Amino acid sequence: MNETGVLMEYEQILLGNTINSRSKFTATYISKNADDRYALHLLRYVFEEILDWSPIVTRTFLSGELIDMLKLRVVANSIQFPPELSPKTDYFYYAWRMYPEMVHITQRELTLNVYEKVLQGMLIKYPKGFFLKLHGEINKAICLNYAIEQYLHPGSIEEIYKFFSDKKKGTSVLGEISVSGYL
């Protein structure tokens, strides 16, 4: 893989030079069908060499506004996201992909990210396959556990059993905390 070409293209775009009518990246390097290693290499170059940011700073401060200012929107859009994350709001995922050995995101963090978006109304429904695919059962357990901790505040496991033994009451609460129908 020759990353020099994508870096040279980016520098020309950043400088506003339109040599050979180039104001966009060539599809060889940056596109939905291209290998996203080029896009990730370019992002690492920008954050490490141009901005002098660490992986943690990148995860914390990366935003849509910064991506647009650095003329990286096309690059960012070429990176494939899992269905439970959005390239328009979940900028931490870029840092995770650029620095998988340094920036860690657990399945619980990813699942609760989606769950909170559903609760806040940012997502109308859970992403397709969220409770069915590879981590579906784990996602269900994480959401239920979090909901019980946050909304029921049980003192013991016996209190949880007692609460959910009343089917009407338990189903009502599960509906209110957006996990009904998935368990």
Image (cartoon, rainbow, N blue to C red):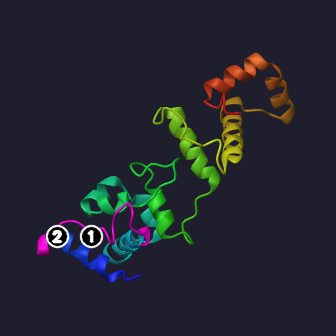
What secondary structure is the magenta-colored segment mainly? loop
Quadrant position of residue 54: bottom left
Identify residue type, mark 2.
Arg
For mark 1, what is the residue?
26
Q: Amino acid at mark 1?
A: Thr
Q: Quadrant of residue 182?
A: top right
Does 100 appear above or below 138? Answer: below
Mark carried by residue 22: 2
Residue depicted at x 36% and y 55%: 63
The residue located at (41%, 81%) in the rendering is 1
User: Which element carries disc 1, helix, strand or loop?
Assistant: loop
Residue 123: which numbered mark, if any? none
Note whether residue 18 is visible: no
The residue that appears at 63% across and 54% down in the rendered structure is 107
Mark 2 residue crowding within 10 angstroms, few (<14) / some (14–19) / many (20+) = few
Residue 81 shows in the view: yes
Instruction: Report whether 51 appears left or right of 55.
Output: left
**157 up-or-down from 86: above or below:** above
Compute the Cα span from label 2 to label 1.
8 Å
The secondary element bearing badge 2 is classed as loop
Could you tell me which residue is drawn at 84 percent across and 35 percent down? 157
Report x, y in % for residue 180.
66, 28
How crowded is the residue under tag 1: few (<14 C-alpha within 10 Å), some, or many (20+)?
few
The segment highlighted magenta reads: 18-37
* Residue 33 image offset from top left, x and y in percent: 39, 63
Look at the numbered discs 2 and 1 and tell me whether their residues touch, using CB distance below 8 Å.
yes
Within the magenta stretch, is there residue 36? yes
Compared with 30, 107 (above or below) is above
